[in-house]
Every structure is written in C-alpha cells, then in structure tokens.
Amino acid sequence: MDIDGLAEALDAFVPEIMDHCGTPGLSIAVGVGTEVALTRAYGHADLATGRPMTTDTIGPTGSNAKAYTGVAALQLVERGLIGLDDPIEKHLPIVNPHGPRPITLRDLLTHRSGLGINLGNFDRVPPPPLEEHLRRVFAAGRSDAYGGALTPFWAGPVGAAYQYSNVGIAVVGRLVELLNPEGVSFSEYVREHVFAPLGMASSIFPRAQHPDFVPAELLARRSTGYATLPGLRLPLPQLYAGDYPAGSALSTPSDHARFVLALLGGGGGVLSPGTARQMITAQAPGGTLTGPSQDTSIGFVFNVFNGSDGHPYIGHGGEYPWGWSHFTRGWTEDRIALVIAANQLDLGDFGTSDRPSHAAARLIAEIVTAWVHGADPRRRHAQDGLSYLAGLLTGDRLTTRLGITTRPTAEELAGIAEGAVVAPGVPWDARAFREAAGQVRMTDHPLRDNAELVRRELPAHELELLKRQLGVPGLGAFWQGEGVRRDA
C-alpha cells in the first residue's frame, strides 16, 4: 500500500474539506500494523494567536475515551477481580427498577443496562470524586438532558435495548477504582496500566481538564475548541464532565492510534488476545447516541461494522462540549487505524452525523477507506472537479433524466459554458464542463451506464465532497451505482 499516495491525497483534499465544513484545525494519524505510519495536521489550534495545529497538539477525545475505560475494566476481568456476568450490585448499590435481572459489567460495556441516554452531567466547575458524583446522580434519578425532560433516567429493563449511557460508563470507571488491587484512583490506574505500557506519553485521563488535574505542559499543548455555525466560530467557556470516565481524556491522534492498533493486533500487552478480540467483535445489537440501529453491532464499547469488500471495521466517535470532535476507525483484518481530531463542535442538530463537525471526519475517512480497499485515493479531477460534475448533471438533465435521445450539440454546450455566471471563488473550467456534459447520452440501460461513467471518472470519496460543495448531497443513488441492476 502506497502511504505516500495517501499523504498526497490528504494534503490535496483535507484543506478543501476544512474550508467547506468551517473547521479551524484538524490533526490525523494513520496506523498500520504496529506503527503509526502517517501523521498530518492542518489549520490552527488557536485562531486568536495563530498557533498552528500540529501532530503533537492535544485535544479532548470525548467519548472515544470510553474504550480506555473498557480496557481497564477488562483487565480486572482477566485478573479475576470481577466477572463479565457478575451482578455489579455486589460492589455498588445500583439496581435497575424495571425488572429482576441485575446489571452486569457486560451490560454496561454494551450499553444495555437499562440506563437511559444522558449527556455526561457537565457543569461549569470540576466534578467531585467519582464516588460522590455517582451517589448524587443515582439519588436524583434524573437525566441531565434538558433537566430530565428529554429522556428518562431508567429507560427499561436490563438487556432489553441499546441505550447509549455516559452514566453507565462512569459506573464502569468506579468499578475500576473500587476493585483494582493497587487501590489507586481511576485516572492513576489508566495511566499506569493502559497509557504507560502503550507509550501514550501525551495522553491523560483526568477528573477534569483543569490545571488542578492536568500537568501544565500537557494543558499548554491543548487546542482551543470552537463551537461553530456557518460563518461563526465561538470559543465557549470550559465545561467539565461529571461522568468523566466516559469522556474527559486528552490525547493526540498518534497516541490514540497506538491504542487502537494494540487492540487490532491482539491486545498489545494490555489485554490478552482473546479479550481484545471480544472487545472488537459483535457482542450485542448496537446503535447510535439516538437509539438502537439494525445496521450496527457493538463489541465492548466499540461499534462493529461488517464493512465492504472484505474490510470489516470498528468505530467510535467523540465530542467534548462545546468545541472538539474526535473520530476513530479501525479495520480489523487489515490492522489499520485512523484517528481524526478537530477543534470544532457544530451547534446544529443534536447527535447527527451529517453536521459539519462530523462531516469533515467522515469525508476524510472515505479517502482513507478508498486507500484501505486498494484504490488510489488521489484526486482524479484536480482542478476541474466541480465543473466536471456540473457537466454530468447538465448532460443528464438534458437527456437521460427526461428520456431524450438527442444530445446537445457542441455549440450548445459551448454557449452554456460561456454564458455561465459563476460566483466569486468557485473554480470554473468550461472545457471540463463541456466534456462531461457531452459524455452523457441516452442508452438502452441509462441508469447503469450513468453509474459506470460516474464511478470511472469520480471515485466515491471525491464525488462525495463535490456533491456537498455543489449543494446536492442527496444527489441520488444511481450516481454511486447503488441499486442499479447490472443484468438489466
């Protein structure tokens, strides 16, 4: 696999993706086998000072930190200190009121404890110790989202359904704190037993991202987070998660990629091969932050996907309010990890994967996916992609969309191109427009032939960005060749 070709593709695409999504800064790490093979950083870690984003810039991992907590708990399982299917009420007085089955560690790690969806119990001040925080939360019995008006604290019986719960992972962190033989805090245990063995020297899992809990050297390397809306980048005040084992870690993409590679490679010394395999293979039906999904399974913490073309993968996302996003994907058979960190959290629709702060990472992931699948990810239409796609759309609308067999003449296409009114800053290539429009024609199988033309000229990752730039993300399945009968 040509890692230089991937680097070239990222350098070409990522600045354009960031501009489209309004992302201030972004850092990427790609791991292969046992090593971080490629790192890249773009844009700014702080807009006010002009401090650049670098590969050593530290940022909040958000919910990607849940995997650290999961590994710490599974280490205790391997040491015989708790069983995956032991009732946790032997150690903590937590009982689901919806039925007789007790909650187990397995339930917590697969988000099936019956606890409802919550957002992390954030506040403007650092939280108390974990024991005290959880005592308050369970005594109140109320979700934090809109003061409990959005979701119930207990959503149903144990094991009945996937319900993404930050409180549930905080309970796992408290179990780590209670049961580790050294008697150390959760944060200290993760540092000694997860980060140190994997050489994650730029990672820390503090109670709060605050000078009282984070060394000055690490805090100085943290990016400034920005809450964004189109045309706006807002540096909002610092918030602190009470459910901190669910998302308060700080890291670099390179460090997190080392962690993912360790799990893909059999545990990397922090877990046994068998336990590591369990963590990244399907254990139960999964879902998203907004609820169950038939298309997703869950391992222990990680979402598990079958992938395509024989490339299954695991994934997880992370956000830290209001200013940071984090993306993880690991191809289990290929042993390739992708980690993307951005100092952006869009203030748009809650929990959707299409808002800009998520879309930037997803667009980059498509570039790396093409490379993992053995394709050349470099841009095929380096300067004229928008014009070429506009030509394909125009050719389709003048012929195949309406069933018209007569193609526009070269003179007509030239007149369209010359008469185009193009907004400032939009690249326009009349030659590429004319060429593309002239390639579309009515055939015996127009949907199939259009799809093949698009796939040949515009790889999926390039097409996805161009569609978004032209404002037509829902362009239609046939542009990707989806659902087109090949025997028609």
Image: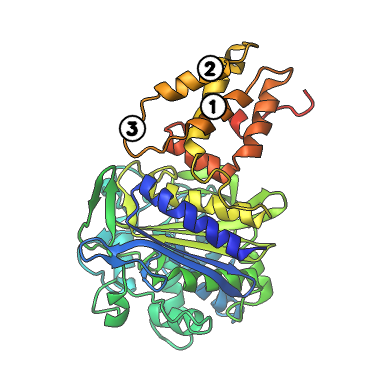
Residue 400 location, x and y as percent?
A: 61, 17
Depicted 51 relative to depicted 313: above or below = below
Report how far apart the C-alphas of labels 3 and 1 lie in the structure: 19 Å
Disc 3 to disc 1: CB gap under 8 Å: no
Which residue is tagged 1?
Answer: 434
Residue 423 is tagged as: 3
Q: Is residue 204 visible in the rendered structure shown here?
A: yes
Depicted 152 relative to depicted 388: above or below = below
Which residue is tagged 2?
Answer: 411
Badge 2 or badge 3: first in the primary sequence: 2
Residue at 53% across / 17% down in the picture?
A: 411
Q: Indicate the amino acid at tag 2.
A: Glu
Residue at 32% across / 78% down in the picture?
A: 218
Within-10-Å neighbours for mark 3: few <14, some 14–19, many 20+: few
Left/right placement of residue 429 relative to residue 343 reads right
Secondary structure of the residue carrying numbered label 2: helix
Residue 62 location, x and y as percent?
A: 39, 62
Which mark is in front, 2 or 3?
2
Secondary structure of the residue carrying numbered label 1: helix
Badge 3 or badge 1: first in the primary sequence: 3
Q: Which quadrant is the C terminus positioned in?
A: top right
